Image (cartoon, helix red, strand yellow):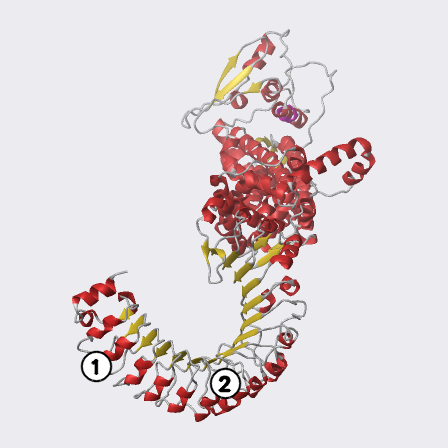
């Protein structure tokens, strides 16, 4: 080993470089005296300058004292001179590629996460991260010293205590500062550098305790395990994707302009009320500071008021782009909630890594506390190396024992703090129900009452967010609220549906009212209430419809139709509808969807309900009392009753029309009909009736009876209709009637008779004794012949026998000169009588689907008949003279 001196103000720095292995030259410590010792002898006035004691030189100084004690009974030798001089110099290793410091930045990747992930790191995770960095520096520093410096220094020991089987090296002696100066002398060992290296290496491997050798590496490994455990849930594929998605959505929700607007407006306060509230708050701050102080005394981590709600004015109107972005956020939050609430992988991952850290902490404290005393400065080596060195026993100096001992105690302190923090984390994990999260504090502060509580991983992440900043969860909660979402939809809806656009959709309905129909919208635009001329409003398949008090602006509104709409109504709006609404139509899927406010509409005249109200007679779900509907005249129920609901009897005194469409369910209990003596119109449609109910015959004021789509095969009970003196319209269509009884002639007041879509084969002549008939429909039957008695019906205006098997038309038919509509289509006719000219009032003639070869020219005498009223094949129409065709084509 070469030695060179660097001068400078009395301080000596020795730089040592290794020579090639084959250069076997004794070093100063082995074969001769050092230059410092030589200078001491040649110049007695020379005294080595004392240097500041650092950790390394301290260890070397203690080594010199140790070796001085070892040879204190021996003559002063060159070994002691060398050790005394080394205690006053610093050693600088020559930089080389193989001996370089390990930068701490190389370990940065173990603790590096995306900056946004910091919101999921509570204070204890941040604290333990800093502790991990400190412990990592301890490990790196120890490993660096282990690599850079000599690990152990050994010298042979010649003395041996026969009484003891173990070799005991003398402890280091403390030099008295007043020790007289004398020349140190020592023993010559006649060992070269290679032998010393061999001795040091063998004693390091065999004699030094394993804990003293591997302490810095253990520190490094344990710290890396702590770092991995702290951040594993951020890297694990099953959890990292959820975390990244959550962080992304959370940031967008926090920064969204809609969040600020929602927190200030969704609470239900209008701007004027807010202004008054702000003034009141400011005054109360001046006049009653004690009361404000009471609010601040509530100790709650989560109760952080949002200053923007109080200090800033109402948010400006969102533009279309911001509205669409907020709408997309609502959808993302819904889907994310459904996905994350299904499992608890994040919670379990965090619990497991915390448990691992606690167990690791216990393990480290346990074995380090037992083994830290094994780090000793003096080491006795009894390896038998007599053949290689000539010595059997050696006394060694562990150069870094003092430093490693201090580092180990320091490391144990940091691990202890780290472990206590992990124990606190464990307490927090198991003491609090982290798989459930309540937004009660947000609901109280913001006034948004419908924010739902969440569970599983969603709840766990929100608990973690609260440890960082509760404001995040408060602003995130806005996007869990349906009220907030509906408010946003309402804002976007108002932008899309302006008042002018709504006016363009107005049209007159069957009741000759100006109607606006809206279909499958996300809500009800507020701009509707600016269309003051609106008379009828029809809403179909619109969820979350809210009718506000501003409906009072529609002074002409009389008709409201709600088809499969979920509706909420303001109390002021109820008062308005109670006074103005005349017609209400409601279509629903379940009887619980029926609006309760319909029972107080005292001026309602027509009520149409379409939906399931129950089919089982024993468990029949009936309507609530309709007794308050004093003006109700028309009631339509399209449901699946087995009996007439009792609630209908409550309005029987003023009910004039009752329509029951039972959707094929058999209606068996009809006794309640007898109590409805004031009924003028009754419809029992699709009720699976096999006979005409006898209760009907008690309705003496009945004018119209419709028994459509039942299972009637015989109408022998028709004789009882003679008691119904006011009956003018009888509809028995879409049944299975095969013949018409003779008693029908007794229905002298009958004006309209519907017998289409049955199985009638013969029209009896006594049918035409009902001489008041103006409307007769026997289409879609099996009729082959029309009796000539049909000419008796001088008031007949509508006659349809289409879709039958008729081959001839009697001339007597053409004596019915008031006939306006004649339908003869889809029969087996081949000739049309010229007497068609007698029907001067005819405006509609259907002949299509027969076997005509030509049309008589006399058809031109029907001046009111035009091309659009003549239903016939084009080729057949061309058989008419050109002047007649032109006449019919003329307007």
- Residue 36 magenta: no
| Residue 728 in the image: above or below residue 12 | below
Where is mark 1, residue-wise? 831
The residue positioned 44% from the left and 29% from the top of the image is 98
Name the one closer to the observer, 534 or 663.
534
How far from the left and from the top, in percent, is residue 520? 47, 56
Say the numbered circle drawn on residue 689.
2
- Residue 61 magenta: yes
Name the one closer to the observer, 66 or 423.
423
How far from the left and from the top, in percent, is residue 857? 20, 73
User: Mostly what secondary structure, the magenta segment?
Assistant: helix
Please tell me whether mark 2 or mark 1 is closer to you in this view: 1
Q: Earlier in the sequence, mark 2 or mark 1?
A: 2
Splitting the image into 4 quarters, where does residue 276 fall?
Answer: top right
Number of marks in the rendered image:
2
Asked whether, in this view, residue 735 is left or right of residue 727, the answer is left
How far from the left and from the top, in percent, is residue 414? 66, 38
Disc 2 versus disc 1: distance between alpha carbons? 41 Å
| Residue 93 in the image: above or below residue 745 | above
Splitting the image into 4 quarters, where does residue 422 fall?
Answer: top right
Mark 2: secondary structure: loop
Mark 1: secondary structure: loop
Name the one closer to the observer, 233 or 64.
233
Name the one closer to the observer, 283 or 129.
283
Please indicate, yes or no, whether residue 626 appears anywhere in the rendered image: yes
Cβ–Cβ below 8 Å for labels 2 and 1? no
Q: Which residues are magenta?
A: 59-63
| Residue 656 in the image: above or below residue 805 | above
| Residue 598 in the image: above or below residue 754 | above
Q: Quadrant of the C terminus?
A: bottom left
């Amino acid at each position: 080993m070469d030695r060179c001196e660097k001068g400078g103000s009395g301080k000596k720095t020795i730089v040592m470089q290794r020579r090639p292995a084959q250069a076997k030259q004794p070093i100063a410590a082995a074969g001769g005296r050092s230059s410092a010792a030589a200078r001491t002898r040649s110049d007695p006035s020379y005294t080595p300058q004392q240097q500041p004691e650092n950790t390394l030189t301290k260890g070397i100084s203690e080594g010199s004292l140790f070796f001085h004690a070892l040879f204190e009974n021996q003559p002063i030798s060159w070994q002691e001179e060398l050790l005394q001089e080394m205690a006053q110099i610093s050693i600088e290793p020559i930089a080389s590629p193989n001996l370089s410091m390990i930068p701490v930045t190389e370990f940065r990747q173990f603790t590096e996460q995306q900056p946004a992930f910091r919101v999921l790191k509570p204070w204890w995770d941040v604290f333990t991260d800093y502790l991990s960095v400190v412990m990592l520096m301890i490990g790196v520093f120890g490993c660096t010293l282990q690599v850079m410096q000599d690990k152990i220094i050994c010298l042979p020991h010649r003395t041996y205590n026969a009484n003891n089987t173990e070799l005991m090296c003398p402890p280091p002696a403390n030099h008295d500062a007043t020790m007289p100066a004398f020349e140190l002398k020592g023993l010559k060992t006649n060992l070269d550098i290679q032998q010393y290296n061999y001795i040091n290496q063998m004693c390091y491997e065999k004699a030094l305790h394993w804990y003293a050798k591997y302490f810095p590496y253990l520190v490094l490994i344990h710290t890396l395990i702590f770092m991995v455990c702290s951040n594993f849930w951020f890297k694990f594929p099953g959890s990292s994707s959820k975390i990244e998605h959550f962080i992304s959505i959370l940031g967008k929700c926090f920064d969204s302009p809609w969040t600020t607007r929602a927190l200030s407006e969704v609470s239900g306060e209008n701007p004027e009320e807010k202004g008054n509230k702000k003034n009141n708050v400011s005054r109360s701050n001046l006049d009653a500071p004690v009361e404000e102080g009471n609010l601040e005394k509530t100790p709650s981590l989560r109760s952080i008021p949002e200053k923007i709600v109080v200090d800033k004015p109402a948010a400006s109107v969102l533009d279309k782009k911001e509205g669409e972005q907020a709408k997309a956020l609502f959808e993302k939050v819904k889907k994310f909630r459904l996905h994350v609430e299904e499992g608890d992988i994040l919670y379990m991952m965090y619990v497991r890594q915390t448990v691992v850290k606690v167990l690791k902490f216990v393990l480290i404290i346990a074995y380090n506390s037992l083994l830290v005393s094994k780090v000793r400065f003096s080491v006795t080596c009894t390896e038998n190396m007599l053949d290689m060195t000539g010595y059997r026993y050696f006394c060694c100096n562990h150069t870094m024992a003092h430093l490693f001992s201090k580092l180990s105690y320091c490391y144990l302190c940091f691990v202890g703090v780290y472990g206590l923090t992990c124990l606190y984390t464990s307490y927090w994990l198991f003491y609090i129900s982290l798989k459930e999260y309540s937004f009660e504090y947000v609901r109280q502060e913001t006034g948004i009452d419908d924010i739902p509580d969440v569970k599983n991983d969603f709840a766990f992440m929100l608990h973690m967010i609260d440890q960082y900043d509760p404001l995040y969860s408060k602003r995130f909660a806005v996007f869990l609220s349906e009220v907030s979402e509906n408010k946003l939809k309402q804002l976007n809806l108002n932008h899309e549906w302006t008042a002018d656009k709504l006016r363009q959709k107005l049209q007159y309905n069957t009741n000759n009212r100006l109607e606006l129909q809206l279909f499958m919208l996300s809500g009800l635009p507020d701009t509707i209430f600016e269309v003051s001329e609106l008379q009828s409003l029809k809403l179909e398949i619109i969820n979350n419809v809210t009718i506000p008090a501003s409906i009072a602006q529609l002074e002409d509104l009389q008709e409201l139709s709600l088809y499969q709409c979920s509706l909420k109504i303001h109390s002021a709006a109820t008062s308005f509808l109670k006074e103005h609404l005349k017609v209400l139509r409601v279509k629903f899927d379940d009887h619980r969807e029926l609006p309760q406010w319909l029972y107080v509409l005292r001026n309602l005249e027509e009520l149409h309900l379409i939906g399931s109200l129950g089919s089982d007679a024993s468990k029949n779900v009936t309507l609530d009392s309709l007794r308050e509907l004093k003006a109700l005249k028309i009631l339509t129920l399209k449901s699946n009753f087995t009996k007439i609901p009792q609630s209908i009897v409550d309005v029987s005194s003023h009910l004039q029309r009752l329509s029951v469409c039972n959707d094929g369910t058999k209606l068996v209990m009809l006794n309640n009909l007898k109590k409805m003596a004031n009924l003028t119109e009754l419809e029992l449609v699709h009720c699976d009736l096999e006979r005409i109910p006898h209760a009907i015959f008690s309705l003496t004021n009945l004018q119209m009876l419709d028994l459509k789509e039942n299972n009637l095969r015989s109408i022998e009970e028709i004789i009882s209709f003679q008691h119904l003196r006011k009956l003018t319209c009888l509809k028995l269509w879409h049944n299975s009637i095969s013949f018409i009884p003779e008693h029908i002639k007794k229905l002298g007041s009958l004006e309209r008779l519907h017998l289409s879509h049955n199985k009638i084969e013969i029209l009896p002549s006594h049918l035409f004794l009902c001489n008041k008939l103006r409307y007769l429909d026997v289409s879609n039957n099996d009729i082959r012949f029309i009796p000539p008695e049909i000419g008796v019906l001088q008031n007949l205006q509508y006659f349809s026998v289409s879709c039958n098997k008729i081959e001839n038309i009697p001339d007597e038919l053409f004596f019915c000169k008031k006939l306006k509509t004649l339908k003869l289509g889809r029969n087996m006719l081949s000739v049309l009588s010229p007497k068609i000219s007698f029907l001067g009032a005819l405006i509609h003639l259907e002949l299509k689907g027969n076997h005509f070869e030509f049309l008589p020219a006399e058809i031109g005498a029907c001046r009111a008949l035009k091309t659009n009223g003549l239903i016939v094949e084009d080729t057949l129409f061309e058989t008419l003279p050109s002047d007649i065709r032109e006449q019919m084509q003329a307007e």
